[in-house]
Image (cartoon, rainbow, N blue to C red):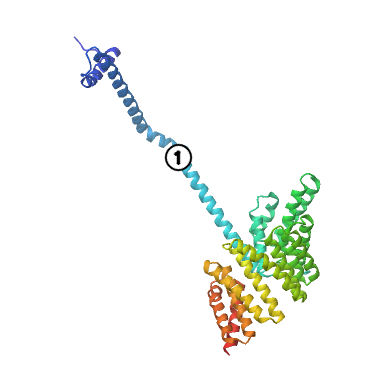
Amino acid sequence: MPETDPTLGEKLNAAHNWARAKAEPYLSWLPDSVEPYAVDIVAGLVLFAALVALWRNGLDLLRTATAPLWALWRWAAGTEAPKSETAVATEAAQRAEEASKRSEEANVRLERKIDEALRTGRIGVAEDGRPDTSEYAIDRAISAAREVLHSNDPAKAKAQEALQIPDFQAAEDALEEAFNREVQAYARVDDQTQQLKAKAARTAREKAALAATRSVVDALAWYRKAAELAPEHFWTHIELARLHALCGDLGAALDAAETGYRVATDDRDCSVASNEIGDVQVAQGDLAAALKSFGAGLEIRERLAAQDPGHAGWQRDLSVSHDRIGDVQVAQGDLAAALKSFGAGLEIAERLAAQDPGHAGWQADLAASHGKLGQLLKAMGQREQALEMFEKGRAIVGPLAENSEMALWKGYLRSFDAEIANLRD
């Protein structure tokens, strides 16, 4: 008789028998009363596992078979193959890291561009006041520009765009506009007045710092605005003292320095104010008063340095105080005392330079200390010792001047060369 296809029941029964045959040899050790049931259970599990494996293999085969079709469809539609969550997260992290690196590199390039533009000279110097082209003024302007560039304040956006060029006059104008808006804002809002006044004062200081490289007169005007808005801000009064002294208004400079001392909130600020007062008194010719002021600053700085001997900043401040006192002692004709003061400053400068040989600032301080001692020894008639000091200073400055375009290093080098040539004649 002809054969017919097996029914679904027959297929299931055949599969069950196959599974039983696979499981039965492993369960023959069970009691006869238990073995049939155990065989049926294990057979069911084996059959289920076989079906799952068949289903998964079928899916894999389906994916493999349809992969060319999906690839063709994505090519036609212009889409990419789907990525795993891990791959997506990894790519996102890589993009973020690359964007951060590009942003950081762009900021460094921009800051170098601003630095170079300021150090090579401002364009459009004001007619009503000479510029302050000292290293300090340029460094302060660069710091203010960096502060503006890194600000998240939308009011500084226009100034940031100007600094990107860099167009310093446009940046000043933009800061002035921002200042005027901030002044108007704090005048309208009573409960936020102090915060907005402080914000406006900060903007005025930024504007003043940039203006100082163009016009001391303009810078003074803006620091005065800042002082009116934030009369307790210590550094505003110090900047006013320095600019007044630069203009020759020593009375106003002394008033500003003494105001700075009154509003100082810590020992370090008190020492800075004492030195500023001493500087003005030197310019006024009152050397006794200047020595007293510098001595007060030295006393504070000795205490700070003793409290934290590892703090390089405190040590450097102490060296500066010794040099200030030495300068006054030279002016008074007390050369022996000056030699002791300059020697103390040199000892600190040598220690700082040895701790961090790559720190250009410490090297500059050390070279300056050699120069001061060399000039003093020459005045005392000790030519050989003076020549030794000048040669040591030149050995520090020479490589720095050769590898840098900074006028400071080149000026030091010229001074040392002139002193050495003079002593060798």
Query: Of residues 357 and 274, which is closer to you in this image?
Result: 274
* Viewer-closest of 222 and 276: 276
Check disc 1 and give the amino acid type.
Thr
Q: For mark 1, give the secondary structure.
A: helix
Q: Is residue 157 visible?
A: yes
How many marks the image carries: the answer is 1
Image quarter of the C terminus: bottom right
- In the displayed structure, would residue 107 be above or below residue 401? above
Quarter of the N terminus within the rendering? top left
Where is residue 302 drawn, in percent x and y? 64, 66
Residue at (59% x, 86% y) in the render: 383
Across and down, in percent, residue 198 comes to: 74, 52
Q: Which residue is mark 1?
A: 86
Is residue 405 in view?
no
* Front residue (pair 166, 396): 396
Tell me residue 180's x, y (percent): 77, 53
- Neighbour tally class for label 1: few under 14, some 14-19, many 20 plus, Cα within 10 Å: few
Residue 253 pos. (x, y %): 77, 68
Left or right of 8 on screen, residue 129: right
Residue 10, image quadrant: top left
Quadrant hosting residue 378: bottom right
